[in-house]
Amino acid sequence: MLILASASPRRRELLKKLVSSFVVIPPDIDERALDPVMGSADLSHEVARIKAYSVFAAHPDDEVLSCDTVVVCEGEVLEKPKDMKDAISMLSKQSGKSTKVLSSYTYISKDKEISRTVCSEVLFNPLSEAEIIEYIEKFQPFDKAGSYGIQDDYPLINRIEGSYYNVMGLPVEDLAEHVFKR
């Protein structure tokens, strides 16, 4: 049985593009306990591995897939916002700039482990404070790295270089190639 070790409804929907049957068991870990000064790719990679192993320890006969996404703007890791003020700050930092979205995943089974990180670049439109507040009030992005959802119907983003699904939180194309080969 495949287990998705994630509480994210977006990851659940995206995984359905690759496999028809899986169960969801969110890991019981404190992601914020990891050192945020760790390099951004290392941080997302390590969080994905910890999530996978925390679930795999209780289900060693199953397959486990976990993922972690971080947004990096000018060298600063932007994880999930703590509150409205934090969300405004994050979106203000990204306004008119290019950011990197790193999604790391770990797949574990009895026979193998695959851990990879996928990077996409996102160019934000310039945003006024009023637009930022309107977006946050409308979409409540408090469970999203960088304080935004690429799938939200709002003109935040000018363009993406790389995987749209990676920015959404699960690098579907990379998983199809390296884990769920068809």
Image: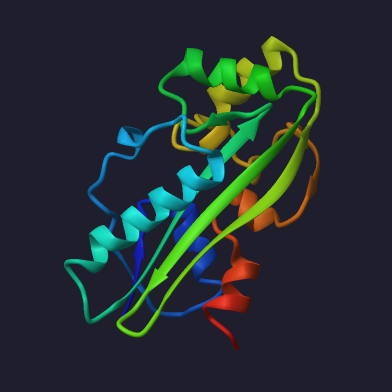
Q: How many discs mark residues in the rendered view? A: 0
Image quarter where the N terminus lies is bottom left
Please, which residue is most extreme toward the bottom here? 182
Q: In which quarter of the image is residue 149?
A: top right
Where is residue 166 shown, x and y percent of the image? 62, 55
The image's colour scheme reads rainbow
Q: Quadrant location of the C terminus?
A: bottom right
Q: In this view, does 101 lie to the left or right of 66?
A: right
Residue plotted at (42% across, 19% down): 83
Which image quarter: residue 88?
top right
Can residue 8 be spotted in the picture? no
**Which residue occupies 63% across, 49% down?**
167
Looking at the image, which is closer to me, 74 or 93? 74
Residue extending furthest left? 58
Across and down, in percent, residue 104 comes to 52, 55
Residue 115 visible to an observer of this rendering? yes
Between residues 170 and 21, which one lies in front from this camera angle? 170
Give the residue at x 78% y 27%. 97
Q: Residue at x 27, y 79 (%)?
A: 62
Q: Position of residue 9 (x, y in %)?
A: 43, 53
The answer to whether 152 appears left or right of 14 in the picture is right
Q: Image quarter for residue 177?
A: bottom right
Picture layout, residue 135 above or below residue 166: above
| Residue 180: % across, % down | 53, 81
Q: Residue 130 vs residue 24: left or right?
A: right
